[in-house]
Amino acid sequence: MTNKVVTITLNPALDLTGSLESLNVGNVSLVSNSSLHAAGKGVNVAQVLRDLGAEVTVTGFLGRDNQEMFCQLFDSIGVTDKFVRVQGATRINVKLVENSGSVSDINFPGVKVSTQEIEKFEKQLFELADTHEYFVLAGSLPQGISVQMCASWIEKLNKLGKKVLFDSSREALSAGIKACPWLIKPNDDELSYLVNEPLTSLSMIQQAAIKVSEGVDNTVVSLGSEGVMWYCNGEWTKASPPTMKVVSTVGAGDTLVAGLCWGHMQSMDKNQILSFATALSALAVEQIGVGIQDINTVTQLQEKITVTSLNLTKR
């Protein structure tokens, strides 16, 4: 077992989240309450892992001009800050959460990273590889980082025997998968993009996941309220949670990744890992923001999650 993990957020963001009755596209929408907090997929994963008891080091690229909220967060949750500071301001992303549970994301491009800053990050990353086994690389890429560059880091960590959990989308996900990370966590929409066709059934999702993830040890597919599927060693396992009261789905996928990482770090068995991570993710939709309010609530919900083996069905 190990408690040490590195989370990599190449393109973090300050998340401005607003709750409203419904979004009036092209017109005025009134927000009933809002929050601004330091985020980014890897940062969210780090928060959940810290709540679980992990010793977390965070890294990536952070704009110097508005780093205060990140610094405050890292201090308050007790993670080791190894972010490379870069010129400019970290982006602000807008998330509009409607009463129906629907979320509209408006994501901005982020800072532009220089060659010197990339070299500094690379040096630091592979120094961390001397003392860490688990790396979570999550989120989009900033300007200046190509998908091939990101994939090369996965490949190098992989060759060093590191367990890389990779969670991204579109071209970055496609390129990263080819570098054979240890675990990926696409959702059905991301798989649909990768195979360039709509996936209208569970069997089509399974077929697509197998098609795109050759060389990947663990392919975990998040299915929203339908649960989570995990493909490993030629076998499918599915976890189905009870119906949850959805407040916001923001951060649920990041919470799932954190749960999967922690379960492996603690040497849980396969069914335990899947039910635990699914319980964490299911509870995450009942709150705004990420983090574990009460670990007992997680274990109680875990007992209500059904884990079953799945056959690969034909289309």
Image: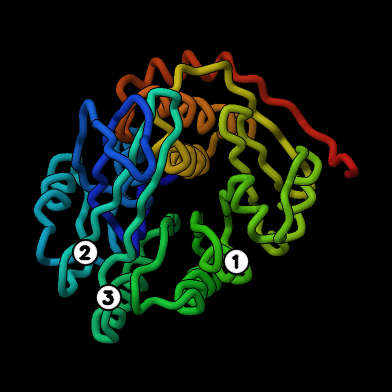
- Residue 203 picture location, percent across and down: 81, 41
Q: Nearer the viewer, mark 2 or mark 3?
A: 3
Q: Name the residue under label 2.
A: 62
Residue type (three-letter) at the residue carrying disc 1: Ser
For marks 2 and 3 on the same chain, the one whose residue lies earlier in the sequence: 2
For marks 1 and 3 on the same chain, the one whose residue lies earlier in the sequence: 3
The C terminus, quarter of image? top right
What residue sits 42% from the left and 37% below the top? 103
Residue type (three-letter) at the residue carrying disc 3: Lys
Quadrant for residue 136, please give it. bottom left
* Callout 3 crowding tier (Cα within 10 Å): few <14, some 14–19, many ≥20: some
* Callout 2 crowding tier (Cα within 10 Å): few <14, some 14–19, many ≥20: many
Q: Name the residue under label 3.
A: 112
Judging from the image, what secondary structure is the residue with disc 2 in? strand
What residue sits 36% from the left and 73% below the top? 126
Which residue occupies the foreground of this view, 23 or 145?
23
- Label 1 near label 2: C-beta < 8 Å? no
Judging from the image, what secondary structure is the residue with disc 1 in? helix
Instruction: Locate residue 140 relative to residue 72 in the image: left or right.
Output: right
Quadrant for residue 120, please give it. bottom left
Q: Which mark is residue 221?
A: none
Instruction: Locate residue 296 relative to residue 239 in the image: left or right.
Output: left
Q: Is residue 266 visible?
A: no
What residue sits 64% from the left and 45% below the top? 188
Residue type (three-letter) at the residue carrying disc 2: Leu
Q: Name the residue under label 1.
A: 174
The span from disc 2 to disc 3 (Cα, nearest Å) is 10 Å
- Residue 94 picture location, percent across and down: 29, 47
